[in-house]
Structures are given as structure tokens and as C-alpha cells.
Image (cartoon, grey):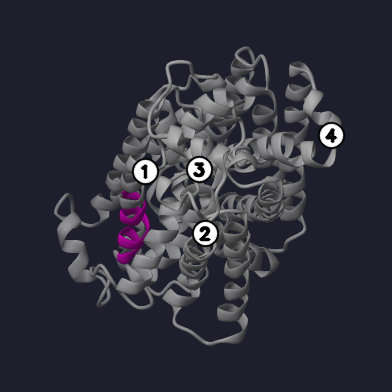
Amino acid sequence: MGFLDWLVICGYFVVMLAIGWWAKKRIHDAKDFFTAGGRMPWWLSGISHHMSGYSAAVFVGNAAIAYTAGFTLYVWWALGITIAMLIGSALFAPRWPRLRQRLGIISPLEYLATRYNVPTQQVLAWSGTALKVFDVGAKWAATALMLQVFAGVPIFWGVLLTGGVTLIYSTIGGLWADALTDLGQFVIQLIAGLVLFVAVLGQLGGVSGIWTLWDRLPEGHGQPFNGNFTMAFVMVYLLINTLSYNGGTWNLAQRFIAAPTGGSARRAALLSASLYLVWPLILFFPMWAAPVLMPGLERPDQSYALITQALLPGGLIGLVLAGMFAHTMAMTSSDANAISSVVIRDIIPAVWKRAGRMSSSTELFAGRVSTFLFIALSMGIALTADSFGGVLGLIIMWFGALVGPIAIPMLLGMLPAFRRCGPTAAIASWATGLVVFVLVKYVVDVDTWLEVGGPVMCSVVVFVLGGLVAPWRNAESDALVDSLDSDTSTARV
């Protein structure tokens, strides 16, 4: 990286900080900090949802999959998320702002105390929060590795640079800062992705390279299913994506909670689905072309970075790297905001009874402190790792396995069809997912699709059977579930 590249990167960070400072003026209480006061426009919510859905790990892990397996990456990841969001636009997205309207929630887990009970809420809150710290730490490490590949910056300084900027604007600006920086990051990523796409086409002989590339790639790279990425794998990952992207990953639920109405949340989900359908075709194209442009790489996870360095002039390399930063900073800042809302509204009130009497200003201050501590702790975890693999890689697998079991009581609990699934079914479902993951990962040798999908499929079965075998009846819970089918004219924001 030359002077122009560093100038672009520094300019990017300055803009992010400026947006955070501007957003601070819109923050008056905890509701503004965590849910944008329920006033976020649907188009901003949709773009923010999309940007918060993946990090720089895409340019590392997904680049390796694209290099070794080809087009199947789009099928099981991008197309799968598109279908998941179409499902969610009808079933889940509109119900999130309605929960805010009915209960005044600012945390994705806050409604579980009414839907089930406090112990169920606490099990999901504590387990999800602990795992997310390590997950975000892994993302800082991935981003720092990309900076090391591009510019030789040590991991330590890479984590401090990206994490420090995110820590500042997330702490002062809350969800408004997250969403507005997501918008700016989306524009940067769009420009950077298009520039690299055009550069790759130039190496392939022009626009015709879009079609002729596939005949030049290794066998199977143009197929929808290849290697371990079978039809069964794609189907189980569709289930996981449906749960994760519709709110099982808490920061994505917040994008819908912040929407004014159920209709706005539905439009936001459809916009995000459209972006996942179209944009990855451009974003992933350099990754798919990498085996032709750079055959025989020993580290396929570096293919995207190496292509960028080889094809782009000074200044544009910095732009592409800024686009990679954009994804990680979008995801981690929104993660921090979501986790902090859970800590402030779900965990602290359960362990400190006086927390329920906090003033609005005190609750806002506590939210900012919680956000700061979460990001700082995740940075500390990233700094203790020598690489993206090892312990962090193991924790990522654990988090991925538990997204489904944690999400099932959250999402299915909003639907009338599962009203009889109570606290016992919810906790048993979560515990089953954990036990099955340990079995398929460390005890029983199974196919990849079953290793990935076994925990969540078993969790779904246990949750449903729990409602059938021991149906749960609670008038307050039933009334809440029934009320989520439509918006209310007296919304609580």
C-alpha cells in the first residue's frame, strides 16, 4: 500500500467518526440509543441489515471456498439468505416492531420474559452474550489479518485501529451511528466492488469473461453443488440462515425493531433480500476468477487480497480495503449495540433489582458503558490470538452451532402455531442443540451437512414436540402472540 491507499483509509475512518459524532445529537435516551426511537426509515434499515450480515471474514473464508469449490458459494450463502429473507418478510420481520409497539422493548430478548418466563430469557441471554464476545473477537482478528496481508501492519495495531474507531462511534452514536455508517460503508463497498469487478473482467478479455470464465475453471466450479456443498448441506443451511438473518442473530433483529411499523420492517427485509440476490454476483466474481488468474495458491483464503494487490493501482487498493473494513465495522458495531441492549434490559435487571428504577439518562449512560466494554473485551480476545484459526476458529464453530438453538425459541415463539411451546420446550430445545453439536463434532463421525444442521434440526424437533406432549397455556403469552399479526395505532416508541 502506498501513500494514496493510506490516505483513503484514513479518510474513511475520519468520515466514520464524524458520522458517529453527528448521530450523537439524535440520542436522548436508551430507546434512541438501541432502537433509533423506532423511527428508522425502511430503506436505511434494509441497507443496514444487509451490511450487518457479514464481515471481513467473507473475504477470507468465503474467498477460500470460492477458490476451491466455485459457484456453489453463491447458492448456499447468498441465494440461501435471499430465500431466508423472503420467508422472514412474511413471518418474522413485521413482528419485531410490533413487539416494540406492545411492550416497548429495546432488546431482542426482552419479550421472552412475557412469552416464556425470566429463567428462559436468562439462559438465552447469558449463553448468547458469552459466545458473541468471542465471535466478534474473531472478526477483529480476520480484519487485522487482511490489513497485514495488504500493508504488513502487525495484528496488534490492526485490531487497535479498526476496533478503536468502531468503539468510539458506536459508544457515542448508538444504533443511529451504526445505521448511518452502514449506509456510508455500503457506498464505499459498492464502488470498491465494482472497480475490482471491472479490473478482473479486463484480465479475462472483457465482458464476455462473465460467461467464458466457467469453462476455464476446474471441474465442478460452475455447478450449484460441489464437494461437501451438497443439496442436503444447502437445505440445512437455509434453515440456519432463516433463523439467523431474521433475528436469531440479535443485531439483525434490531434493524427490524427500529422500523416504525410492521410494513416498514417487511420492506426492509425485502430490500435486504434483493441486495443479497444481486450484489454477491459482483462481489464474489473476483473470488471465482482467482483459480484462473492465480492458479496453485497455497493459501486460497488470501486470494481476494492478492488479486486486489495485483490488479489495482495506488489509491484503489485502499478503497477496496476500506470496503472490507466496512463489513466488519458494520457487523461488530451492530453486534455491540445489540449485546449491550440485552445486558441493560435483560441481564442486569435480573441480577440487580434496583436496575428497573434507573432514570432515562442513567440507562443511556449504562448502555454506552456496556457498548464500550463489549468492544474492548472482544478486542482483547482478538489480541490474544496468534491467528484467525486456533481457539478463535473453534469458538466460531460453537457460535455457529448455537445460533439455531438460541434463535428457535425467539423466532418460533412469535408465531401463533407454536403458542403451546412453553419454557420447558424452549430450554430443552436449547440444551438439545448444544448436546447434539458436541456429539456430531467430537464423538460421532457424520457428513458435513449433518454436522452443520444436526444441532438446529434436533432443536426444532424438541421445541415442537415439547408443545405437543406438554402444551403450555398462559393467557398473557397468548394475548401477546395474537397481537403480533397487525400494527397498532398506539405504538410505543
Question: At label 2, which amino acid type do we have?
Answer: Gly
Nearer the camera: disc 3 or disc 4: 4
Q: Which mark is residue 404?
A: 2
Which mark is first along the chain, 3 or 1?
1
Residue at mark 3: 327
Depth check: 150 or 442 in front?
Answer: 442
Residue at mark 1: 91
Which mark is first along the chain, 1 or 4?
1
Q: Measuring from the top left, give residue 276's x and y in whole percent.
A: 34, 46
In the image, is 24 to the left or to the right of 448? right
Spatial CA span between label 4 and label 2: 31 Å
Nearer the camera: disc 4 or disc 2: 4
Question: At label 4, which amino acid type do we have?
Answer: Lys
Question: At label 1, which amino acid type do we have?
Answer: Leu
Is 260 drawn above or below residue 468 in the view shown?
above
Q: Which residues are magenta?
A: 72-82
Mark 4: secondary structure: helix
